[in-house]
Image (cartoon, coloured by chain):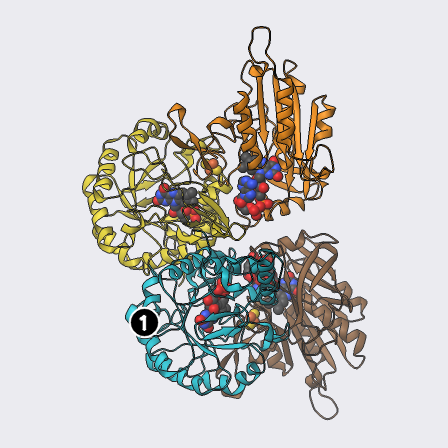
Chain colours: A cyan, B brown, C yellow, D orange
């Protein structure tokens, strides 16, 4: 760790393989819409990157309501990947996002390897997309989703297909709902992923004891928020030590202190997800807090703290 | 935005009125649609109660009364942990608030008479509507129909009357007349007042029903409005995470145009007020 | 669900295979010592059962401190199975427990199949043990522990060895840190387990950003408490539907409402773990709350709500 | 046990005194060892702050003063979320409390002179010891040594003096004499007072040092006590879950008898007060 004696303005830029971010803070897929809603709260150009809601080949209606419920320090959701579809995204949503000085990461999803490939091909041709994040870990859809993310060969096949369909940086978003994430990270690396997103939601369930019904219509849902942070930090640390790819860490990051925990564990960048719901300004406050930490500790580059936990 | 509690008092067992103040809290935020214009009845705010991560999410509460540009009032029922925490705040305490959010009650041109129908805590957003009509819409008359379990839970009736809005009540236990459901009172009212005008058109054609309350009541109001051919706008509830249209968590099923197919609409963003005709209950 | 019109005192008794409990509430292993500490707060005879701290063949020192830290709505621990060893347990701790009218479940742990077997054999001969709970899911020890619980064949071998070494009811405590618990539950059933305990802690990690050290000396630890409840409920529900064994549900149960959630999901009994730390009276309050719920809903047997979620 | 806040006031920036009351809170609970007898200096309580699951665990605070059998006082530093929540409670608020817990400061027979050494918030349990000695142990004299960052953080010195305990202070910034570390003051004191008595024994043989404060201070006090052959009892801290000996979470390494091997002892149950000689720092 390089220390300097006088407080200088540290550099926040980090590199996710071929993708350079002006700062390590991204918004997590599905928690930031297509950016428009939050653009009313702050200038999106402040962000290191924006990840879109998951995009599929055709528009998707998503799951029936109720779709979410609160849990202790967390929430369950089963949105079911409701989205406008990749074509409408490119036509109607992307131009808005392209107007900001930030990296746009298109999160994609398919029911088959071919669908992943087709979505990728369209995004590859679109102007203003800077990277593709491949969601093989959504617990809330019947086919595909987590089914890919819990099978080593399917993981390889999907990532490989996406890799072959684009020259954009490819980020594999892995499922935490496996015995050991490391082999999955390894397969994704071999398939040509440039970076990893860790973690997606944990599979959970909640029951209303009065009605005796599941609190969300889909029965099970994805658990996100501070409750899962210790699991996410552990997975980032395990994968960082074992696999050479840069990591976007996420899972319960609410403030700069949480974000720094992930970076020390091995994350190159971090994403705010559920935090956006609680505090629309969370991402910008996290950026400021990381900068403050670097200054206070005399560290001149954000990248110097990556993986620096003394363990 | 950080607001400060000015008053937080129990109105009747388990129901509270809280006044909060912050610069411009009664107005649309800079950068938001309608920036600088006042919050509209039917809109709501998302309140962060407590400092810890549990409870995690903000709680939606409807604008009950816009007191000034810098202060608003909510009427809330202590129903769970979040509202319990809120009820413990005292004057001077701070509170993180987002809003006003959502669409608000529409008053299409041609509306001359508003029937305001509330059950229990459903009165919360309807009071804002009554305020607006009596303060700013001399062209519209209104009648209010307020139901509750018993006398103490018929909220706001006196306030409505103070605004010179003809107000009817109903209680399930008969502790306040009329005993029974408010929907019966509404039905009688409509039937009594409905007649053909000179041109042979039903007088209810300039009427609109605004409803908020328990689901069973809303359904029966909607059916009645449909029967009499009166527009019905109703404020819906749903679990929310973001409150601003980003998470897709708060959707309900509504009819998509005339073809009978359904789509999911966001309560926070497309609502919370919907045309009752479109709702798939 | 059987409903009666007049409130009668419902029966709380449930059966975990051959083991009958007077009520469904047990204390979770490692969170209740050997009962002595909590006997100062209430009469242990009120409990359906007591699970001991994990017992090994020889006494164990456990992990170096710090051993625990708080996380959002949860805690991490890496006690490392510090315990007095099975012999001292039988000699010094068991007589005390045997003095109460409750079921004593000895939780055991070994580094090898033979150790599991040897511990079981000793407990089998001891008076006052009513069941053996086999921990193959502890995330906080180097050998054995979770290594067994994440390997299907090792799971079978351990449970089979324990099964052969005792005529006492055998409860398999499975790891949630796997892709799918169902096959593990299935293997445990085939090996002769009479019941399942679900879930043990999730593997987690927390970092102090000031010192840049892990908050617990063992680096990773087990995440328990309300934070993990949605994951635990989901696993109980999955296993209940797929495997025929009765389940002891646990993971973040703090009150009767939480306990009922597990029973509706499919748990025959429930265990209070971390809750004991926060409220020493939690188990007795849970028993009272379950009874109240049954009365209010006109249900005459606790067993009638097991698995009754409308999903 | 549910206690009620009687007073909760900031003493100096970030440090608070809170008085709570509940029947028998100053006594050992029925069924616990020493049932009915008063809490002992050095013992502590586990406080549940806030109603939600975050923060989840109880917070340990040492008995600062036993006011009556039914009321006790804590001195606490607002260091994190739990103590911040505590600092927001107002008179009348309720609080779930467990205790008294732990062993307390031992006063072996033969002790005639107690050296009480506290740094910063470490004064919290030492005040209870001073209360006990001055109220109930006329056979023991005491001297107090209190250090702090600056004048405002030298807590309790006036209280000690009011008990007629000779009290020395030290501040790191010199805002209160003596500038420097309290351990230097202690060292000087011991050297000055140490002499041989008529029988040639060192007078420090009836002395004991009671310490609580930052780890660095405790280590240096322990080394000094060892050098002069004075017994040193020190109150230790550790993250706790249960506080009653059940979870094994709060252990520290201590020497196991004479053979130099180490064992883990529970701070909550075997401590929080340990013979400083045994601690592996
Ligand atoms: C647009 C809108 C406006 C509202 N206006 C008012 C109002 O003016 N006055 C009032 O008393 N209540 C109002 N509600 C309902 C109010 O939001 C809930 O009662 C409140 O969130 C319950 O929180 P809790 O922590 O007390 O209950 P808990 O049951 O502990 O809440 C748990 C979770 O469920 C959600 N939740 C529980 N009940 C509801 C509900 N009925 N609607 C939406 N989410 C719910 C909570 O937000 C929280 O995420 C409104 C709801 C919506 C959607
Ligand atoms: C036996 C004992 C007696 C104590 N007596 C006092 C006292 O009289 N006055 C006082 O101000 N403080 C005392 N402490 C320290 C006090 O318990 C912590 O400052 C407090 O728990 C911090 O909680 P927090 O939520 O404010 O901080 P956070 O940092 O948010 O707490 C997070 C977690 O770490 C634990 N923790 C943090 N700091 C400590 C610590 N120093 N010791 C133990 N656990 C810690 C908390 O209990 C909690 O579980 C005592 C500690 C022990 C073990
Ligand atoms: C409402 C909601 C919707 C989500 N939608 C997606 C999605 O479409 N694609 C995806 O890869 N992840 C999705 N996620 C997962 C998040 O991107 C993130 O991985 C997860 O929530 C953990 O981070 P957090 O705890 O900060 O929210 C969604 C999460 C939430 C809460
Ligand atoms: C401090 C601590 C120690 C534990 N020790 C054991 C153990 O020895 N054996 C075991 O099988 N489980 C052990 N567990 C796991 C619990 O029995 C339980 O499965 C887990 O904590 C989830 O339940 P909870 O969230 O209610 O605590 C321990 C848990 C905690 C918190
Ligand atoms: S609450 Fe998030 S979209 Fe409505
Ligand atoms: S805190 Fe649980 S044993 Fe000490």
From the viewer's perspective, tell me whether residue C49 is left or right of residue D189.
left
**Closest to the observer, B137 or B270:** B270
Determine the quadrant in which ligand 2 lies: top right
Q: Relative to A60, is C284 above or below? A: above
- Secondary structure at badge 1 equals helix
Quadrant of res C49: top left
Q: Spot the residue most to the front.
A: A5
Quadrant of res D176: top right
Who's the residue at 22% across and 51% down the image? C156
**Closest to the observer, A65 or A205:** A205
Who's the residue at 53% across and 53% down the image? C209
10 Å crowding of disc 1: few (<14), some (14-19), many (20+):
few
Q: Relative to B47, is C43 above or below? A: above
Who's the residue at 57% across and 21% down the image? D208
Q: Relative to A116, is C174 above or below? A: above
User: Residue tagged by mark 1?
Assistant: A190
From the viewer's perspective, tell me whether residue D240 is left or right of residue D26.
left
Q: Is residue D59 visible?
A: no
């Amino acid at each position: 760790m390089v220390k300097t004696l006088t407080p200088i303005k540290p550099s926040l830029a980090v590199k996710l393989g071929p993708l350079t971010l002006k700062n390590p803070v991204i918004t997590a897929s599905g928690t930031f819409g297509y950016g428009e809603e939050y653009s009313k709260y702050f200038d999106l150009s402040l962000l290191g990157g924006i990840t879109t809601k998951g995009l599929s080949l055709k528009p998707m209606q998503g799951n029936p309501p109720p779709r979410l419920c609160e849990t202790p320090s967390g929430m369950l959701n089963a949105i079911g990947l409701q989205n406008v579809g990749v074509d409408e995204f490119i036509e109607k949503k992307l131009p808005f996002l392209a107007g900001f000085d930030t990296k746009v990461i298109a999160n994609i999803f398919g029911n088959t390897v071919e669908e992943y490939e087709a979505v990728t091909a369209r995004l590859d041709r679109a102007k203003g997309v800077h990277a593709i994040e491949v969601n093989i870990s959504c617990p809330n859809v019947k086919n595909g989703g987590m089914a890919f993310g819990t099978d080593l060969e399917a993981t390889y096949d999907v990532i490989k297909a996406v890799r072959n369909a684009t020259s954009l940086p490819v980020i594999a978003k892995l499922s935490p709902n496996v015995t050991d994430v490391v082999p999955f990270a390894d397969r994704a690396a071999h398939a040509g992923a440039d970076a990893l997103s860790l973690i997606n939601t944990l599979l959970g369930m909640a029951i209303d004891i009065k009605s005796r019904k599941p609190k969300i219509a889909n029965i099970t849902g994805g658990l996100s928020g501070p409750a899962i942070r210790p699991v996410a930090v552990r997975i980032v640390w395990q994968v960082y030590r074992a696999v050479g790819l840069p990591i976007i860490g996420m899972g319960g990051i609410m403030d700069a202190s949480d974000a720094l925990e992930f970076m020390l564990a091995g994350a190159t960048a971090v994403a705010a997800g559920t935090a956006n719901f609680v505090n629309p300004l969370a991402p910008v406050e996290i950026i400021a807090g990381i900068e403050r930490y670097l200054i206070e500790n005399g560290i001149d580059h954000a990248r110097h703290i990556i993986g620096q936990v003394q363990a | 935005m950080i607001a400060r509690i000015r008053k937080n008092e129990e109105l009747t067992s388990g129901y509270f009125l809280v006044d909060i103040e912050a610069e411009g809290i009664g107005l649309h935020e800079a950068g938001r649609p309608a920036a600088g214009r006042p919050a509209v009845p039917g809109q709501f705010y998302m309140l962060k109660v407590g400092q810890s991560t549990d409870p995690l999410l903000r709680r939606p509460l409807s604008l009950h009364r816009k007191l000034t540009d810098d202060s608003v009032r909510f009427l809330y029922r202590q129903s769970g942990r979040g509202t319990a925490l809120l009820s413990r705040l005292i004057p001077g305490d701070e509170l993180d608030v987002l809003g006003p959010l959502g669409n608000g009650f529409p008053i299409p041109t041609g509306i001359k008479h508003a029937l305001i129908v509330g059950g229990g805590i459903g009165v919360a957003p309807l009071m804002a509507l009554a305020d607006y009509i009596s303060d700013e819409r001399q062209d519209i008359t209104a009648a209010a129909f307020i139901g509750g379990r018993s006398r103490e839970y018929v909220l706001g009736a006196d306030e409505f009357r103070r605004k010179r809005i003809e107000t009817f009540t109903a209680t399930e236990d008969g502790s306040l007349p009329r005993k029974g459901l408010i929907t019966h009172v509404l039905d009688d009212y409509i039937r009594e007042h409905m007649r053909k005008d000179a041109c042979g058109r039903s007088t209810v054609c300039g009427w609109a029903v605004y409803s908020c309350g328990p689901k069973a009541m809303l359904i029966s109001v909607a059916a009645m409005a449909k029967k009499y051919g009166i527009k019905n706008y109703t404020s819906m509830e749903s679990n929310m995470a973001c409150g601003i249209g980003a998470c897709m968590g708060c959707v309900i099923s509504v009819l998509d145009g005339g073809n009978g197919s359904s789509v999911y609409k966001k309560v926070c963003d497309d609502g919370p007020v919907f045309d009752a005709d479109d709702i798939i209950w």
